[in-house]
Image: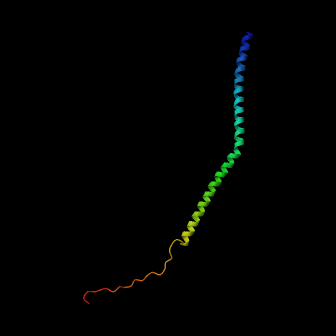
Amino acid sequence: MEQAVIAALLVVGLIIGAGVGASYARAKRGWTDYQTIRTSVPGARRNAWLAIRGVVVKLAVIALLLVGAAAYAASGGGEERAGPTPSVTPTPSHRAGR
């Protein structure tokens, strides 16, 4: 009878030990992942700000080009200035027989 109780306690201990071991392994893996991501955040944040800065610079250049093009079109810079136009002069017609 004593051996049956010892065997049952051993089985229960193994089941509880396996559950605790799996939980410990999961917690250790989570902590390792947390530490890895925590150290990589500053680099990722720096890269994100550099990407945002690049987009803002490109948008600013495009906006300046659009404003410049609109100002140029509003000032009429591309058109030739209208000068005096030649007047129509009548040409003498040549009548036959006169």
- Residue under the point 70% across and 25% down: 19
Image x and y of residue 9, in percent: 73, 17
Q: Quadrant of the N terminus?
A: top right
Q: Quadrant of the C terminus?
A: bottom left
Image x and y of residue 26, in percent: 69, 31
Q: With respect to residue 90, does 5 lie above or below?
A: above
Q: Is residue 75 left or right of residue 92?
A: right
Relative depth, front residue between 69 and 14: 69
Which colour style is shown? rainbow
Place residue 65 in its image quadrant: bottom right
- Residue under the point 69% across and 27% down: 22
Q: With respect to residue 41, does 69 lie above or below?
A: below
Place residue 60 in its image quadrant: bottom right
- Residue under the point 55% across and 72% down: 75
Direction top: furthest residue: 1
The mark tally for this picture is 0
Image x and y of residue 47, in percent: 66, 48
Q: With respect to residue 77, does 65 lie above or below?
A: above
Q: Is residue 98 left or right of residue 34?
A: left
Image x and y of residue 12, in percent: 71, 19
- Residue under the point 60% across and 63% down: 64
Direction left: furthest residue: 97
